[in-house]
Image: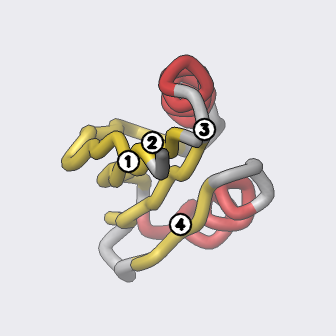
Amino acid sequence: MTEHICSLVVNTQPENRLAVAASLNELPGVSVELNDPSGKMVVLLTHTHQDAQVECIDHIKGLQGVGATSLIYHQKISND
């Protein structure tokens, strides 16, 4: 089984950060690891297929309140 793990920085306006974090935490394979009062978040994505991660990142970019996303890290782990 292969697993893809990546981290993103998601930027939002400070007044939107709680709503954006709640939306992110509802997505499968997504968790908000850091939610700074300035509106910057560190988000962890874990999926079994890279295509699913790309779709998820595209979805995050389109969420209301999200200003920008930056991919920080990606690793493919094979458990074979």
Residue that appears at 53% across and 66% down: 17
> Which of pointers 4 and 1 lies earlier in the amino acid sequence?
4
In this rendering, is residue 33 above or below 21? below
Give the CA separation, mark 3 to mark 1: 9 Å
Give the CA separation, mark 4 to mark 3: 28 Å
Q: How is the image coloured?
A: secondary structure
Q: Secondary structure at mark 3?
A: loop
Q: Amino acid at mark 4?
A: Arg
Q: Position of residue 30 (x, y in %)?
A: 61, 56
Q: Which residue is mark 3?
A: 48
Q: Which residue is mark 2?
A: 4
Q: In the rendered structure, find residue 17 and report the number of the disc placed on it.
A: 4
> Which of pointers 2 and 4 lies earlier in the amino acid sequence?
2
Q: Which residue is mark 1?
A: 77
Residue that appears at 49% across and 25% down: 50
Residue that appears at 59% across and 66% down: 31
Mark 3 surroundings within 10 Å by alpha-carbon count, few (fewer than 14), some (14 through 19), many (20 or more): some
Indicate which label's residue lies in the foreground, 2 or 4.
2
Label 2 with label 3: CB-CB less than 8 Å: yes
Taking depth in this image into account, of 39 and 43 the one nearest to the observer is 43
Q: Amino acid at mark 1?
A: Ile
